[in-house]
Image (spheres, rainbow, N blue to C red):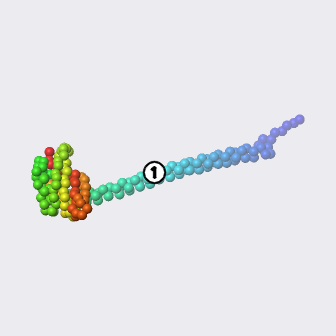
Amino acid sequence: MHCVAQIGKSVPGGGKSMNNTKNISSSRILLIASVITIILLLVLSVIKISHIKETSSAINDCNLTLQNNKDRLKELEALKDNHSKLENEHKALINKIPASPDKQGLIDQVNQYSIKNEVKLVQVNFDEESEEEAFVEMPLKLKFEGKYISIMKLLEELDYGERLIRMDEIQIFNTDVFSNNVRAEISATGFYDK
């Protein structure tokens, strides 16, 4: 027996099998690489969308802050324009607060307003004083009798008079069924400097 081997000749079907395996391996690698690439692109897209939303939210916050600052600036400009008026009103209020209690002066002023408005001052009582930051409060009770319209004019004069008086409570009662007169009981507060 004689065996002859041929060198250089391929065995039928032997080389194709290896090429097919290489082609399948290359296809699988390409497919896996493509899937990984798609997944990475999706992850990057989600991250970018998240950043875009955060940036958009930050822009909206900045716009809101900007609008609030613009509104505040308008308010400050309006205050600046009214500064001298407010300063004059402050000075006027300060001038309405005397340096001492001067209770008799306050009674005289209230009585003067009563006479001017044809209202009878029935009673004035002072309660215990209390110290505040910049001034002393002097609570008082006032009773008047007169026509309703006259008492309303008197209250306006007390409100805008020479001395600062805060009206805390006002009660108005009929004095008689057949009379045009009413009685007003007022809880008020006068002020003076410390």
Q: Amino acid at mark 1?
A: Glu
Picture residue at 44% right of the left edge, 54% below the top = 56
Image quadrant of residue 86?
bottom left
Picture residue at 41% right of the left edge, 52% below the top = 58
71 or 51: nearer the viewer? 71
Quarter of the picture containing the N terminus is top right
Q: Is residue 128 visible?
A: yes
150 or 177: nearer the viewer? 177
Picture residue at 24% right of the left edge, 52% below the top = 168
Judged left or right of residue 44, residue 81 is: left
Label 1: few (<14), some (14–19) or many (≥20) C-alpha neighbours in 10 Å: few
Residue 49 % position (x, y): 50, 52
Picture residue at 61% right of the left edge, 49% below the top = 34
Residue 90 % position (x, y): 18, 55
Secondary structure at badge 1 equals helix
Q: Is residue 133 visible?
A: no
73 or 96: nearer the viewer? 96
Which residue position is annotated with label 1? 54
